[in-house]
Image (tube, rainbow, N blue to C red):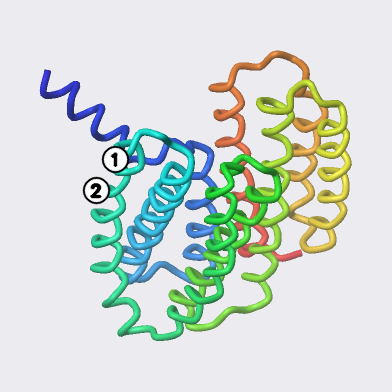
Amino acid sequence: MSTSRGRRALRRWIPNQHGAWAMLLVPFLAGALLGGFVGRHALLLPAWLLAYCTAFHGQQYVRLRRLSRNPRAPRRHLAPLAGFGAAFVLCAIPLAVAHPWLLLAALCAAPFFAVNIVYAYRNEERATVNGIVAVVPACGMLLVSDRLGSGTVDSGAWTAAVACLLYFTGTVLYVKTMIRERGSEAFRVASAVYHGLAVVAAVSLDPWLAVPFVVFLLRAVAMPGRGVRVAVVGAVEVLCSVLLLAFIVCGHLFPC
């Protein structure tokens, strides 16, 4: 009984946006690999994940506070909000003291968070624009992670960040065609066209990126309409994320 209660409590605390984890981790890892791992990354990673968890529960509180007639519904997010927020502050303070430029990075991310709050308030979290807005600061974490390791941000880091932005923006469109908009021909065409343009953009950034972005295009064209289970969709995206990370690193180690 205690185990099952613990699992239920854990599910209430951990955000249920499973696709977000790859978006949080891949840019961070890419930046750390490009700039070089340092001990401070071991503090930056939990701070980053805790910031996401805090933001998630903050958005849910705002959404339910406006929409729910049950006053207890929004309150269930207060404990995770406070817990994750406190843990984030504990991780963030020593980082900010050692590297004040991180405060500027956080300030740059704030407008995107504000937009996400507005969409949550309107109960439109699943809107395409909101998803794309969330992608931007997640990919920006690549630059933060890279600078923390190398002390600077070079053109290679910017190329990798744009590659992540191209991929995860495409993921927002592609996943729509597989789940919430699976019957929409307009979304299917928009996703295919976007992925075609993304191939061109990615190759212009780095020829190494041709392979993963052609794979992304093929899955965007071939997968919709086949009745693929949600779990399979998620597994494919995990593999695509790993593929992107691998080719970003290859392009860094073996520049064309």
The residue that disc 2 covers is: 79
Q: Reply above or below: 129 against 31.
A: above
The image shows residue 230 at horizontal and vertical percentages of 58, 22
Question: Can you identify the residue that label 1 sits on?
Answer: 76
Q: Which secondary structure lies at badge 1? A: loop
From what the image shows, is residue 63 above or below residue 180?
A: below
Q: Nearer the viewer, residue 237 or 245?
A: 237
Relative image position of residue 112 (x, y in whole percent): 58, 63
Q: CA distance from mark 2 to mark 1?
A: 7 Å
Residue 108 located left or right of residue 76: right
Q: What residue is shown at x 78% (from left), y 18% (from top)?
A: 225
The quadrant the N terminus occupies is: top left
Residue shown at the point (81%, 26%) measured from the top left: 184
- Which residue appears at 63% of the width and 64% of the height? 252
Residue 242: x and y, percent? Answer: 56, 43
Which quadrant: the C terminus? bottom right
**Label 2 secondary element:** helix
Which label was assigned to residue 122?
none
Q: Residue furthest left?
A: 2
In this view, 7 is above or below 253: above
**View extreme (top): residue:** 227
Residue type, label 2:
Ala
Would you identify the image quadrant in which residue 109 lies? bottom right
Left or right: where 202 falls relative to 106: right
> Looking at the picture, does residue 2 appear above or below residue 200?
above
Give the quadrant of residue 84.
Answer: bottom left
Residue situated in front as seen by the camera: 250 or 39? 39
Is residue 45 toward the left or the right of residue 230 in the image?
A: left
The answer to which image quadrant residue 220 occupies is top right
- Assess whether mark 1 and mark 2 are in contact (beta carbons under 8 angstroms): yes
> Which residue extends farthest front?
69
